[in-house]
Image (cartoon, rainbow, N blue to C red):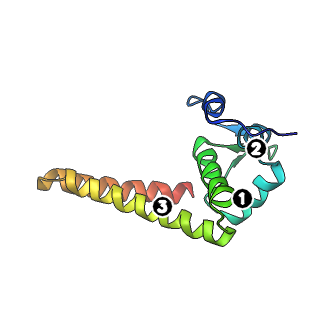
Amino acid sequence: MGRLLKGHEMETTISRERLYYRIGEVSRITGLKPHVLRYWESEFKAIRPHKEGSLQRLYRRKDLDLILKIKKLLYEEGFTIAGAKKKIRDLERLENKQLKLKLVEKGSNGEAHEFLIALQEELKGIKKILE
C-alpha cells in the first residue's frame, strides 16, 4: 500500500510553495495511514489541519513537519504517545525561549527594544485569535 518515501524523495514531494496538502497526500508523503493521522490529531493538539466546508482536512507545511517529527519520536526513538507529547512541548518551549532571547539581544537600544517587545505582544494577540 503506502510506501515510505526516502529523504530526497520526500523533499521533492513536499513543495515549499504549496499551502495545503490533503490527508491522502500527507499519508503518502509520511508513510502513515489516514486513520493514524486522524488519531494523532486527537492526541497532539498542535496538529490542526484546516477544514473546508466539505470537511476535507487540509494540512499545512507546519503540520507536515510536526507529523514527521512525531513519527520519528514514536517509531525511531521509541517514545510513547505521552512521552512524545512532552518532548514536543519541551521543544516548543525551547524554541520560544530562543526567540525571546533573540528579540532581547537585538533590542540593544531602548527604542528598538520597546518596538520589539510591542511587536512580540501584537504577535501573541494574533496567535490567540488564530487559535
User: In this figure, what is the number of numbered marks?
Assistant: 3
Q: Which residue is mark 2?
A: 31
Nearer to us in this view, 90 or 58: 90
Instruction: Find out whether the residues at labels 2 and 3 contact each other: C-beta distance under 8 Å.
Output: no
What is the secondary structure assignment of the residue under circle 2?
A: loop
Mark 1 residue type? Glu
| Picture disc at residue 41 | 1
Residue in the picture at 21% in, 55% down:
105
Q: Which residue is mark 3?
A: 92
User: Real-space Cα distance between discs 1 and 2?
Assistant: 16 Å
Q: Quadrant of the C terminus?
A: bottom right
Label 1 crowding class (10 Å Cα cut-off): few <14, some 14-19, many 20+? some
User: Real-space Cα distance between discs 2 and 3?
Assistant: 25 Å
Sequence order check, earlier mark of 1 and 2 = 2
Nearer to us in this view, 62 or 113: 62
What is the secondary structure assignment of the residue under circle 1?
A: helix
User: Real-space Cα distance between discs 1 and 3?
Assistant: 17 Å
Q: x, y (%) of residue 72?
A: 63, 54
18 versus 45 height, above or below: above
**Residue 52 visible:** no
| Picture disc at residue 98 | none
Q: x, y (%) of residue 85?
A: 61, 67
Mark 2 residue type? Gly
Residue in the picture at 72% in, 59% down:
40
Mark 3 residue type? Glu
